[in-house]
Amino acid sequence: MKQHQSVIRAGLAGLGLSLAMLAGCASAPTSSPSAQAGAEKVSALREVQAMLTGSFSSQAQAAADPENYFDIRLHMTPIWPQASDGPWLYVEQATAARPERPYRQRVYRLVALPDGGVRSEVYTLPGDALSFAGAWKDVAKFNTIKPDQLTLRDGCAVVLRRAPDGSYTGGTEGTGCASDLRGAAYATSVVVARPDRLETWDRGYDTQNKQVWGAEKGPYVFVRQTN
């Protein structure tokens, strides 16, 4: 009889352990594949935004190779932080000699892609873009306009994907980014974003696919100056 009771007690103890394990498994937080994918998208957006935001300079590259590169200052800063369809960034490029007259002013919108990549859409400003010169230091200037007043540059979006070394690399896709600068028919961009620098290679090609503007030796290297 005692032996029979011992077997019963052992069985109940084992059952209690099994139920405890099941209860622990049931109460452990789990995340669905869709939730994990959503978190990865948010992470990619934040990483790319952080890498793009700041002030950058190609001074070192220009000093080392003045025949092929200019001393350019590049500024990117978030705008419209409350927008639910962002992040949005204001982008301004100017020569170091004339920072008050930027030669390129754009607005980027970052969009998370299903595969974990990030698409940077390119927009032009309404009216006289020079009225926004220096707005990277005073983003309140953008309170006077809304995103729907911008003009999307079709075919000019840059798609970035995370590389094994932690950088985000990519560029435009195809020849759909129209350009008429110096006789060009279309433009292409290649971008590598890292925490300490940006590498950008913008080039224009004519209808015969001959390069007519942009750096020829390789990308511009913009070293981060500030966050």
Image (cartoon, rainbow, N blue to C red):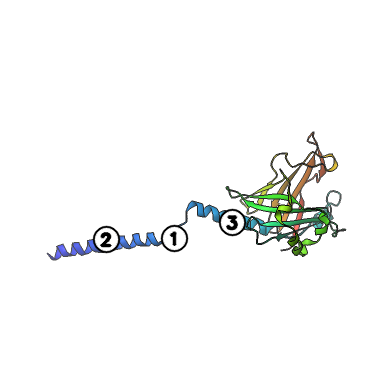
Helix, strand or loop for disc 3: helix
Residue 131: x, y in percent? 82, 58
Q: Earlier in the sequence, mark 3 or mark 2?
A: 2
Observer-side mark, 2 or 1, equals 1
Q: Earlier in the sequence, mark 2 or mark 1?
A: 2
Residue shown at 63%/54% (left/top)? 166
The image shows residue 212, relative to residue 49, as above or below, that is above
Observer-side mark, 3 or 2, equals 3
Quadrant in the rendering for residue 176 = top right
**Side of 180 where 12 appears, left or right:** left
- Proximity of marks 1 and 3: CB atoms separated by less than 8 Å: no
Residue shown at 25%/64% (left/top)? 13
- The C terminus: image quadrant: bottom right
Identified by mark 3, the residue type is Val
Helix, strand or loop for disc 2: helix
Helix, strand or loop for disc 1: loop
Q: Which mark is residue 15?
A: 2
Q: Earlier in the sequence, mark 1 or mark 3?
A: 1
Residue shown at 79%/45% (left/top)? 217
Residue 22: x, y in percent? 34, 59
Residue shown at 69%/49% (left/top)? 121
Residue 56: x, y in percent? 76, 59
For disc 3, the neighbor class at 10 Å (few under 14, some 14 to 19, many from 20) is some
Identified by mark 2, the residue type is Leu
For disc 2, the neighbor class at 10 Å (few under 14, some 14 to 19, many from 20) is few
- Where does label 3 land, which residue? 42
For disc 1, the neighbor class at 10 Å (few under 14, some 14 to 19, many from 20) is few
Q: Which mark is residue 29?
A: 1
Identified by mark 1, the residue type is Pro
